């Protein structure tokens, strides 16, 4: 049984599209992505202009501590290294390479570095809005796709990321490009094997920008496996293997270099344990910019106990051992900490500022997303599979953020994806036929 979705005069099935009466209409909308790109940049620049002066400062501590120095090292020909000559493996190389290109271009064009960084952020936001539009249009049509793009380009916490040279903007572009290509081949080109490989490469690029993405290649491979369940297992295995191969091809050069320099295999970066440690001591490690926390006293005591054993927390095994002992000794405080970290993943900030205001805004978006996603789920077929795939990625990012420092900045990338899923609820006229 094949699923066919008929909308606005166009008939689509998984793997083919009847380009009949709707062809002229599709051509007439080719200018829409350009309009979305321009509108997104305009909204981003307007956001910068209206942002109060107290919020305009660059608060990206990772930028000053690692990304910028490494970008300048690359431009100077020193490679990925610290001042003492030790290899710089705290983060993967993607964002320093991008920054090196931006800073180098600013010197070549004789423009201030701040201008080029702002241009990159605005263009990145514009590209991400276009990618969301194209992904939503692939599934729901142009009308709902416009809604998804509008939700994303006006989403205040995505716009917040553009005010400083975070790695999230470049990551989001690579991540959304991989998702768009994955669903494009599933819906339109199911047998285009080379596109599965390219999709895997794009996943690898995203991983090299932010290590939080280390599992997305596997999640997309699982999506391909289950969505194409009517395809023989051997053919599915080939497509999944091509995707994962592309993933490996992208990251192996970095892994090989890191192994040659450190003598050990790393999971994209060597900062993972530090991130886990920060995630359970953030309220008692102010770092000079975090506001005083209003957490329960027993949770603060638990964090103090963990911080006191900081010298022991150097490996995943030692983290697990210490956390297990602390949770057994303080089960109530430990449970509170778990629940707090789960919740803060959707409203927390590194500085601790404005968290209650952020929570109220997020709850308003949650209502819109939940209703739209439920309506999309009820359409069944490929639309339901997309909602499932989106939810899997949400759970994955939520889990990774929970393990590290639980802040909204790390979960923003999947918000755009659920905007796409929820856009299905605003589809005007759909007829699903089984043939």
Image: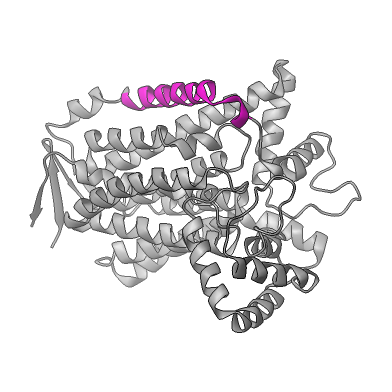
* Residue placed most toward the observer, 29 or 339: 339
Q: Is residue 267 above or below residue 416?
A: below
Q: What scheme was used to colour the molecule?
A: one colour
Q: Residue furthest top?
A: 110
Asked if residue 173 lies left or right of residue 141, the reply is right
The percent coordinates of residue 222 (x first, y second) are: 39, 65
Count of all numbered marks drawn on residues in the image = 0
Q: Is residue 170 above or below residue 398?
A: above
Residue in the image at 46% along x and 51% along y: 199
Residue in the image at 46% along x and 53% along y: 346
Q: Which residues are magenta?
A: 32-56
- Quadrant holding the C terminus: bottom left
Q: Is residue 200 magenta?
A: no
* Residue placed most toward the observer, 418 or 37: 418
The percent coordinates of residue 89 (x first, y second) are: 75, 55
Residue in the image at 53% along x and 27% along y: 122
The percent coordinates of residue 272 (x first, y second) are: 67, 62
Q: Taking the image as drawn, is residue 152 in sight?
A: yes
Dominant secondary structure (helix, strand or loop) of the stretch shown in magenta: helix
């Amino acid at each position: 049984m094949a699923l066919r979705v008929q909308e606005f005069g166009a008939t689509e099935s998984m793997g083919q599209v009847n380009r009949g009466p709707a062809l002229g209409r599709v051509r007439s909308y080719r200018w829409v992505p350009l309009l979305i790109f321009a509108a997104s940049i305009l909204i981003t620049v307007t956001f910068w202009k209206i942002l109060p002066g107290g919020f305009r400062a660059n608060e990206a501590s990772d930028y000053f501590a690692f990304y910028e120095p490494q970008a300048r090292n690359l431009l100077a020909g020193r490679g990925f290294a610290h001042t003492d000559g030790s290899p710089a493996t705290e983060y993967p190389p993607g964002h320093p390479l991008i920054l090196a290109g931006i800073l180098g271009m600013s010197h070549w064009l004789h423009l201030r570095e701040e201008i080029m960084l702002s241009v990159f952020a605005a263009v990145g936001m514009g590209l991400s809005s276009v990618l969301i539009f194209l992904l939503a249009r692939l599934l729901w049509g142009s009308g709902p796709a416009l809604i998804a793009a509008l939700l994303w380009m006006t989403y205040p916490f995505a716009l917040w990321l553009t005010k400083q040279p975070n790695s999230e903007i470049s990551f989001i572009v690579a991540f959304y490009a991989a998702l768009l290509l994955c669903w494009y081949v599933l819906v339109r080109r199911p047998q285009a094997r080379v596109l599965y490989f390219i999709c895997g490469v794009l996943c690898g690029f995203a991983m090299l920008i932010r290590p939080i993405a280390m599992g997305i290649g596997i999640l997309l491979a699982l999506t391909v496996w289950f969505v194409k369940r009517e395809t023989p297992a051997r053919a599915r295995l080939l497509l999944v293997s091509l995707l994962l191969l592309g993933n490996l091809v992208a990251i192996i050069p970095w892994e090989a270099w890191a192994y040659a320099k450190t003598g050990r295999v790393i999971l994209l970066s060597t900062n993972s344990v530090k991130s886990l440690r920060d995630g359970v001591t953030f309220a008692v490690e102010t770092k000079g910019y975090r506001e005083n926390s209003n957490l329960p006293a027993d949770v603060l005591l638990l964090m103090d106990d963990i911080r006191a054993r900081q010298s022991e927390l150097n490996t995943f095994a030692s983290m697990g051992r210490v956390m297990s002992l602390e949770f057994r000794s303080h089960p109530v405080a430990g449970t509170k900490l778990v629940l707090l970290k789960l919740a803060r993943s959707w409203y927390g900030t590194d500085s601790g500022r404005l968290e209650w205001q952020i929570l109220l805004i997020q709850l308003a978006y949650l209502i819109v997303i939940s209703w739209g996603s439920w309506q999309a789920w009820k359409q069944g077929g490929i639309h339901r599979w997309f909602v499932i795939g989106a939810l899997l990625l949400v759970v994955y990012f939520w889990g990774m953020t929970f393990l590290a420092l639980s802040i909204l900045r790390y979960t923003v990338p999947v918000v755009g994806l659920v905007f796409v899923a929820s856009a299905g609820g605003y589809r005007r006229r759909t007829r699903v036929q089984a043939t």
